[in-house]
Amino acid sequence: MSKPLRVGILGGGQLGRMLLQVAANYPVETFVLEKGASAPAAKLCYHFTDGDIKDYDTVYSFGKSVDVLTIEIEHVNVEALLALEKEGIKIYPTPSALQTIKDKGLQKEFYLSNSIPSPDYVLIQNKEELKKHLSFLPAALKLRSGGYDGKGVEIIRTENDLPKAFDAPCVLEKLVDIEKEISVIVAKNDAGQTAVYPPVEMVFDPRYNLVDSLLSPARLTDTQSSAAQKIALQVVEALGSSGIFAVEMFLDKTGDILVNETAPRAHNSGHQSIEGNYTSQYDMQMRVLQNLPLGNTAIILPSLMLNLIGEEGHSGSVFYSGLNETMQIENVYVHLYGKTETKPGRKMGHVTILGNDVPELNTKAEMVKKNLKVISHS
Ligand code: ADP
């Protein structure tokens, strides 16, 4: 019998946890590197290493103990990955693709030089330099590195918004008149095979202007949908890396599709694929890691994914209220990430709802939102 493939995952959050749930189906031995043994992925792997994914030596020695490495978060030590790659460790995505993506400035240059449609931009070093580009406003100002979940983005409409500008290297990107935000997940294996998922749509809550849920498939025309899939594939082919990628795009009011950014890993916008598509993004990632044939990306039924967020005013030991009522609703699937502590706004899990059409999904989503709350023990 051949030895199981040793698969290393950098990062131990929920994406790693969901990858491990699928890894159990394959002849692999799993390793996770993350700070703190209470991380969501820590209990589901064969070997857990408590360490910093940003530290060169820690990542290097972790990488030496596995056959293939993957990530569940971009903020890892890329220099260590470059050294490991030279020594024959297979890494998905490649360290060079990761380098391009980690820096939003390099990412924008990559889109431009590969003729991938993306909003116009200028690179600036600091706040002082921003003042020379007032004619470029309104724009989205994005930290070149370190931002996530919208935290490194400020909308600068006029000179009056300058006080909130970051004083650091940034991308200043033309503000897009957004009709819809969509995402396409793409997988590529070392055999050169690719698999492209149908686009999903981020649905905003108009009250807070926050991403409230994701709808699969996105409500697009067939032409828009295939254009989005074509662009997403173009991004992955140009990156020249195997792996799993989420290409986030804007459909603007004129009908153009523009790439916002790419994540070189499984993504929040692919969670619904666990129940909603024949092959989940995590199963796809496991296939990539083993260079196995990729699966079917088609949708089984339309789905809606809700993030389960810690309620305002609740911090501490978590309690999920309304689980029983929620699970009485047909085709509602609850995923809890095993985080022991809740705090307002923390992603604690998600719920995927399957249904025949959008009205049915919305009705069920309202029932779930009414019932299921992430609170703390009082
Ligand atoms: P993050 O990497 O933190 O998720 P994004 O680059 O995706 O940040 O930006 C967060 C949000 O800001 C987007 O989902 C979108 O709503 C808005 N945004 C970003 N860039 C633009 C733009 N060029 N025009 C209009 N809105 C934008």
Image (spheres, helix red, strand yellow):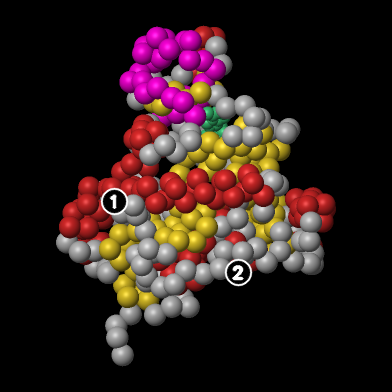
In reply to whether residue 204 is colored magenta, the answer given is no
Q: Amino acid at mark 1?
A: Pro
Q: Secondary structure at mark 2?
A: loop
Residue at the spot of label 1: 95
Q: Which residues are magenta?
A: 119-143
**Relative vertical location of residue 28 with respect to residue 81 in this rendering, above or below:** below
Mark 1: few, some, or many residues within 10 Å (few <14, many ≥20)? Answer: many
Most distant residue in the front direction: 223
Using residue 106 as the reference point, say whether residue 89 is left or right of it. Answer: left
Residue 59 appears in the figure = yes
The residue lying at 41 percent from left, 26 percent from top is: 171
Q: Position of residue 233 (x, y in %)?
A: 47, 51
- Please say whether residue 141 is one of the residues in the magenta stretch: yes
The front one of 340 and 249 is 249
**Label 1: element kind:** helix
Badge 2 is on which residue?
A: 278
Residue 183 spot, x, y in % from top left: 56, 47
